[in-house]
Amino acid sequence: MNGARLRVDFWDVAQADCSVVTLPDGRLIIIDVGRVGSPLVDWLNERRGAPPEIESIVLTHNHVDHAGALCSIVAEHKRRIRAIWMLADRNASDLREMSLFRCAEQAQREGCFPIRRLEAGQIIWSDSGLDASLRVIHPSFTENIQATSPNPTSGLVLFESAGCPLIAWPGDLDITRVAEKCGSGTPWLLFGPHHGGPTDIKTSKIAASEAIHRLSPRRVFISVGTKNSYSHPRPRYIQTLGNDGCHVLCSQLTQRCEMERIRDEAHVFQGSAALGLRPPRSGVSCRGSWRVYLHDGRLIPDQFDSIHLERIAKLRRPQCLYGRRWRRGIELPKAVA
């Protein structure tokens, strides 16, 4: 896009999370890396001839669907990584659980990069020229230490421009906690959380619905796998978002929208190919990967929104459109600007 100085790619990595921020000078900030076998690994390896510097790798938490590909990336690119941001959310006596930290720790001992604690108040990156920054607003030190499992201590990372929250990455955090930590700031784009299945959408329906209304994001990107066994994304979550006028995008198609396409492996829209990114090794693409650009303090989606809307309108039960009260025979809702 002409005039854009920064872009964010939300990758299709099946039932996992991965986003890549490309800074104006070409450096990368990677927020979650996906599972072992993540397409991000191949994409980075293909650029060995002219590899970009990785300003930071940020892990919202250390579950394998967010952090599993870390060791593969460190093995190939440790001299090009400037910092890794992690949480203390693993059992130190479990060798399997600590393996991610140990591969990063070894590279730190070799002088490749520092490992930093992902903690509220930390500024991961800022640019005075763009008047933009990436900062951590959850968890605090005590919230991290006192958490009994990784999801409640997931990092909540906020991208801001001119003091306005534009993108929130909450990992697997409950939606009520996301709303609490964002306060009066309403992000234009919310990533997930928890693959479109916030834990509290089932257990605290009223509180979760109120939290969604308080947040009122204009866009939500849900990174979800076609064959996931968790019933993600949850229809109630999508419907509540849609009722507020939110435009929801899912990376992959799930059985709630159409079983026939899944059976035939018929992609709705192959966003990864359209954007020149590596596709995942499994799943049926709905939106696939998605890209937004920062332009004059605003986020501008890539040029494929209208094509995708037209294609999902042909599905048997397009949950994201039904949430916006669309039915066949009436005009399609517009892509949210």
Image: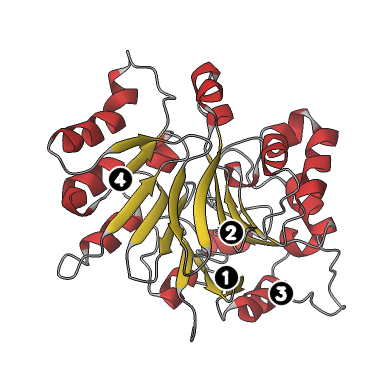
Residue found at x 79% / y 77%: 332
Q: CA distance from mark 3 to mark 1?
A: 17 Å
Read off the residue under disc 2: 253
Read off the residue under disc 4: 83
Report the side of 139 relative to 277 (left or right): right
Q: CA distance from mark 2 to mark 4?
A: 34 Å
Front residue of 128/323: it is: 128
Is residue 95 in view? yes
User: Where is residue 141 shown, x and y percent of the image?
Assistant: 50, 25
Q: Residues within 10 Å of mark 2 (few under 14, many from 20)?
A: many
In the image, which disc is placed on residue 244? none
Residue found at x 53% / y 34%: 154
Tell which circle, 4 or 3, labels the residue nearer the N-terminal end. 4
Report the side of 176 relative to 112 (left or right): right
The amino acid marked with disc number 4 is Ala
Q: Quadrant of residue 188?
A: bottom right
In the image, which disc is placed on residue 335? 3
User: Where is residue 314 shown, x and y percent of the image?
Assistant: 70, 73
The amino acid marked with disc number 3 is Ala
Read off the residue under disc 1: 268
Tell which circle, 3 or 2, labels the residue nearer the N-terminal end. 2
